[in-house]
């Protein structure tokens, strides 16, 4: 039988406000344990929460960027449970009146566009961190992260494959970065996703029983976990078994997921309105003020790239998939009159090197202006394309600007006719067979001879000049 | 719903407390009589009445997004029953 | 007269005239504590040395003119659920028996700014859950009028200390009557301000939407003086109201002519002890003679106050008390085999039975299956009660009924049957449910010479009217001059 996979996501994004959500401690990743804490975020009795206004504005921004309706009335609720990373034994979250509802994000998989609906976005506080030390019998608790503002983005079960889920997450990440509400660093946990997944026979309307997977720390893990879980559920059903509604934990090292203890499912969170915080009324004036401050979003930028720079949609899509990359492109284009070349360099060598070196776009060691200079060196004929590729690698290695690299390493094109003619003659002398082939009518041999001259000049010779001189000499 | 000893046990689980058999018996009687009193609200006609979810009448109390210095760690931890390497210590947690 | 017998107003005038010093007043009260504490047990912690040191410093500031507050140099004490930096704040619980907050409650900071001298921390029911101070982990507090009787609760220590001269005034918290009931039992004045008048920052939460801090004083004048110092918007408490509080002493006017008073018929009659009933009727007569317009009104929703209170206050408390888990502060069980066991042993050993009972009940009311039946329903009825009060206050300035159905009871009578104890607070709960200000003033004695309290409620932020009515009543009766006979 053919099965269809049904996926919904719950994504937590840490907001990059200056201070925490309910106290004035710094909102910053890392730090020595328990040094970003006060009586409030460490759960001492008698201390009360005070809402950070920026958190609301960031959440509204996110909602608008994802085409949501912003609630006129919203408020915080308490979610009660015991865990050592939760200092107050309740998380201040939103249950009944989330700040944003009914939005969507459009994804693009293999050229096919599809809207993924967003059920709601709500605000809440993050918990602290448990450190499982290798020695001793205990677990260490650090509340630096406790009280970090989060938004949770909950989708409808609209995705049908790991690729779609990945495309959604990439788009979501790009949007959150473009509007500057979250840095979305998965490795630091500032973007985390839980996957709700079920399978059903193709054509069946009702959903199958879903499981929820946690502990997914990278896009790659999410894709693997989805593929694993879909397969597991299908095999379970095929072999006459049952899929249970449960929470499963993904083990990325082993590449498997396993059910978490039953207890967690039995949990009753006893939500009720947070009595320490008055409700929040968001009037249309406030919404419009935020709307007008929104920067250009990835989709708009993509369309502009196609329109303004005549880039292929595919390229524009990739360039706008990351705020850093897109900003890098824009900056380079400002300093260059060859947008197409800028795009090609980013799409080609730059992304390849990032991938090889397992680097993020944030880590590009040189400013975008340097890429513009490199392109201008090629366009002016000062270096050849193949030399440029080497210079580009050097730029990555050293962070130096291309002019300096070319100068220091003497890489500028050799356009001295006499010097090149001397090398041309040497190459002809060393390759009599090819010379004979050419003279015998095999014009292809010319390419080989050009290559040999380029090799002998370490690529520095002006290829047009080499061509011209070779033909001259061969015709003698 | 009838409050039974089983209800009390489930509640105790949720609240993370143990109850001795004697406590359970005591609790059962007193909780039953209190719940009986709570049940009286069922007779009140509350149709078309919005729950009063916030006792204050004002809204939108916010703080500007400004950082203030955190408290010194040794003061934060000074009341902790057990701490080590600048952290609170709890019995080993297995996920 | 001894200094400890005097009021804030009297002492403050003497301090201004340099007839006495802050150190002398503090000594006088500390001596009184030394003498009576073994019999009464008002305090959990006494900070005598700090008090004397502070008195010395405050006296300097009075002398050099930098401190002009009427509270400057006056020794006082606070209920032990109000956080005091570096001084144990226990909530009368084993759970917090070793807890020293690294911060001051806003009310404490304000009182210090006014030059108040803190003597120590007062006994109470554990986590403010009780009506007799008997659920305290540490000790019994006895009623100064009759040591065989309870002082009321949960703020028994706060009321008994003021009544006995172990403090010139005190602060207490009121969740369902925790301030007014003991003030009534001990024959002193107690005011629960409007919800949002006084910052709750640093008050260890019992039921967040009910809790409010207020003064217990020897008379209405002192009540206004303390209220002036502690009210006001606090950026650390989002539920504190952003309003301009008047100078409350401006309302100390001996006049109730034309004042419209509604007497809640639901709360008189059979519900009351006969002698309380009589004292109340006499009090109404006094007010009538002074020109107040008194008439009976019906507030039918008030009969639902008790279940509404039990559901909402216990639910909030069950959530607020989750944080006592042996991780960050306070008690942790000595032995445990894993995290779950540590949580459960800590909470089972650290909390007393009344606290456990309310946590269980509150958890029950909030559980997903029961939420609509209890919690949501109670919120609807809470609105009905509020609406009924609002309507009543369109017509009346003050609503009047006794503070308690009877006078101070004997030890052990209420602890056996908790429902009886909850019922006992029936007259004080409505003000918390609706967030209204309410004051209790002494209005007589029963045949056992135990005080009876008269309770007045007003509309939100109507503290001024309350003070005026209470002041007038006080100035035209003799009850404030009676003090318990303590050798």
Image: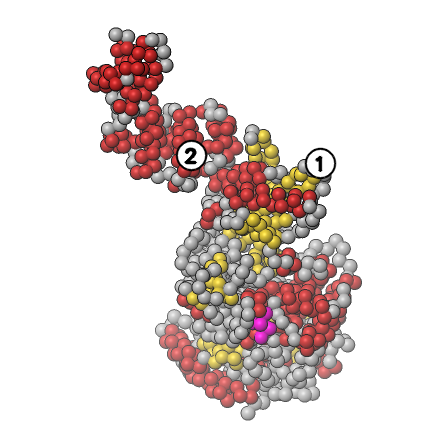
Q: Main secondary structure of the magenta part?
A: helix
Chain letter behind tag 2: A
Q: Residue at x 48, y 49 (%)?
A: A189
On the image, numbered disc 2 is attached to which residue? A351
- Observer-nearest of A444 and C178: A444
- Observer-nearest of C81 and C276: C81
Highlighted range, magenta = C342-349
The Cα–Cα distance between marks 2 and 1, rounded to whole angstroms, is: 40 Å
Give the residue at the far bottom of this rendering: C487
Q: Is residue A433 left or right of residue A6?
A: left
Percent position of residue A238, x then y: 69, 43
**Quadrant of the drawing holding the C terminus of chain C:** bottom right
Disc ID at residue A203? 1
Q: Secondary structure at mark 1?
A: loop
Whether residue C212 is visible to the viewer of this picture, yes or no, is: no
Q: Residue at x 34, y 37 (%)?
A: A396
Q: Is residue A187 left or right of residue A94?
A: left
């Amino acid at each position: 039988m053919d099965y269809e996979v049904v996926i919904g996501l719950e994504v937590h994004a840490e907001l990059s406000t200056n201070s925490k959500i309910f106290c004035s401690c710094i909102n910053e990743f890392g730090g020595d344990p328990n040094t970003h804490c006060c009586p409030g975020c460490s759960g001492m009795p008698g201390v009360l929460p005070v809402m950070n206004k920026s958190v609301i504005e960031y959440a509204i921004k996110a909602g608008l960027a994802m085409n949501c309706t912003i609630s006129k009335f919203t408020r915080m609720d308490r979610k009660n449970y015991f865990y050592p990373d939760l200092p107050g034994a309740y998380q201040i979250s939103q249950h009944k009146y989330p700040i944003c509802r009914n939005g969507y994000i459009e994804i693009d998989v293999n050229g096919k566009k599809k809207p993924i609906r967003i059920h709601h976005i709500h605000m809440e506080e993050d918990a602290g961190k448990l450190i499982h030390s290798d020695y001793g019998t205990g677990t260490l608790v650090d509340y630096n992260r406790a009280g970090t503002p989060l938004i949770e983005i909950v989708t409808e079960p609209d995705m049908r494959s790991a690729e779609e889920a990945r495309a959604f997450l990439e788009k979501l990440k790009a949007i959150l970065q473009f509007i500057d509400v979250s840095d979305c660093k998965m490795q630091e946990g500032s973007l985390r996703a839980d996957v709700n997944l079920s399978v059903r026979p193709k054509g069946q309307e009702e959903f199958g029983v879903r499981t929820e997977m946690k502990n997914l720390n990278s896009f790659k893990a999410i894709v693997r976990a989805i593929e694993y879980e879909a397969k597991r559920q299908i095999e379970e059903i095929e072999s006459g078994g049952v899929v249970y509604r449960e929470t499963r934990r993904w083990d990325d090292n082993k590449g498997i997921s396993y059910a978490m203890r039953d207890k967690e499912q039995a949990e009753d969170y006893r939500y009720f309105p947070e009595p320490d915080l008055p409700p929040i009324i968001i009037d249309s004036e406030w919404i419009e003020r935020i709307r007008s401050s929104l920067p250009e979003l990835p989709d708009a930028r993509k369309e502009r790239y196609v329109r303004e720079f005549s880039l292929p949609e595919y390229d524009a899509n990739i360039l706008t998939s990351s705020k850093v990359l897109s900003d890098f492109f824009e900056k380079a284009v400002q300093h260059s009159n060859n947008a197409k070349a800028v795009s090609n360099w980013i799409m080609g060598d730059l992304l390849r090197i990032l991938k090889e070196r397992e680097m993020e776009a944030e880590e590009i060691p040189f400013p975008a202006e340097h890429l513009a200079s490199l392109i201008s060196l090629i366009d002016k004929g000062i270096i050849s394309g193949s030399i440029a590729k080497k210079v580009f690698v050097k730029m990555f290695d050293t962070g130096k600007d291309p002019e300096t690299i070319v100068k220091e390493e003497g890489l500028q094109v050799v356009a001295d006719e006499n010097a090149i003619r001397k090398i041309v003659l040497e190459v002809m002398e060393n390759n009599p067979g090819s010379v004979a082939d050419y003279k015998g009518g095999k014009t292809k041999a010319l390419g080989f001879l050009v290559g040999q001259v380029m090799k002998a000049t370490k690529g520095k010779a002006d290829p047009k000049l080499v061509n011209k001189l070779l033909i001259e000499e061969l015709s003698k | 719903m009838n409050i039974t000893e089983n209800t009390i046990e489930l509640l105790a689980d949720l609240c993370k407390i143990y109850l001795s058999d004697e406590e359970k018996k005591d609790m059962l009687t007193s909780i039953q009589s209190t719940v009986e009193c709570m049940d009286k609200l069922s007779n009140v006609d509350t149709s078309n009445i919005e729950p009063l979810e916030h006792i204050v009448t004002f809204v939108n109390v916010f703080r500007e997004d400004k950082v203030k210095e955190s408290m010194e760690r040794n003061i934060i931890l000074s009341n902790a029953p057990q701490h080590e390497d600048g952290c609170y210590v709890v019995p080993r947690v297995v996920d | 007269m001894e200094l400890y017998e005097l009021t804030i107003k009297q002492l403050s005038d003497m301090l201004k005239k340099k007839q006495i010093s802050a150190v002398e007043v503090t000594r006088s009260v500390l001596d009184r504590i030394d003498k009576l504490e073994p019999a009464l047990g008002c305090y959990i912690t006494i900070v005598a040395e700090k008090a004397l040191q502070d008195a010395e410093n405050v006296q300097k500031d009075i002398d050099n003119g930098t401190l002009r507050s009427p509270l400057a140099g006056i020794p006082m004490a606070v209920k032990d659920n109000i956080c005091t930096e570096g001084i144990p704040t226990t909530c009368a619980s084993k759970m917090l028996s070793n807890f020293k907050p690294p911060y001051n409650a806003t009310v404490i900071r304000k009182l210090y700014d006014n030059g108040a001298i803190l003597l120590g921390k007062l006994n109470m029911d554990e986590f403010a859950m009780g009506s007799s101070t008997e659920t305290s982990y540490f000790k019994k507090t006895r009623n100064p009028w009759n040591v065989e009787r309870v002082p009321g609760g949960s703020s028994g220590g706060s009321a008994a200390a003021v009544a006995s001269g172990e403090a010139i005034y005190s602060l207490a918290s009121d969740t369902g009557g925790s301030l007014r009931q003991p003030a009534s039992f001990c024959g002193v004045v107690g005011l629960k301000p409007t919800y949002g008048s006084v910052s709750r920052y640093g008050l260890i939460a019992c039921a967040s939407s009910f809790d409010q801090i207020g003064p217990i004083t020897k008379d209405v004048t002192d009540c206004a003086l303390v209220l002036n110092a502690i009210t006001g918007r606090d950026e650390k408490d989002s539920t504190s109201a952003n309003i301009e509080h008047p100078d409350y002493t401006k309302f100390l006017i001996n006049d109730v002519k034309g004042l419209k008073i509604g007497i809640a018929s639901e709360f008189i009659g059979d519900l009351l002890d006969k002698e309380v009933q009589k004292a109340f009727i006499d009090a109404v007569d006094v007010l009538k003679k002074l020109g107040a317009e008194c008439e009976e009104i019906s507030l039918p929703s008030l009969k639902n106050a008790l279940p509404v209170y039990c559901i909402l206050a216990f639910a909030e408390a069950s959530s607020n008390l989750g944080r006592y888990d042996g991780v960050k502060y306070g008690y942790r069980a000595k032995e445990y085999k894993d995290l779950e066991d540590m949580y459960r042993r800590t909470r089972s050993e650290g909390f007393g039975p009344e606290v456990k009972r309310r946590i269980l009940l509150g958890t029950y009311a909030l559980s997903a299956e029961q939420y609509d039946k209890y919690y949501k329903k109670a919120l609807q009825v809470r609105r009905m009660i509020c609406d009924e009060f609002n309507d009543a206050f369109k017509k009346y300035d003050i609503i009047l009924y006794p503070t308690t159905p009877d006078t101070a009871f004997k030890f052990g009578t209420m602890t056996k049957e908790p429902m009886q104890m909850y019922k006992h607070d029936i007259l004080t709960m409505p003000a918390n449910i609706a967030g209204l200000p309410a004051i209790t003033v002494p209005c007589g004695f029963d045949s056992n010479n135990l005080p009876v309290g008269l309770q007045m409620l007003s509309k939100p932020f109507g503290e001024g009217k309350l003070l005026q009515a209470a002041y007038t009543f006080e100035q035209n009766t003799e009850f404030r001059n009676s003090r318990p006979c303590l050798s």
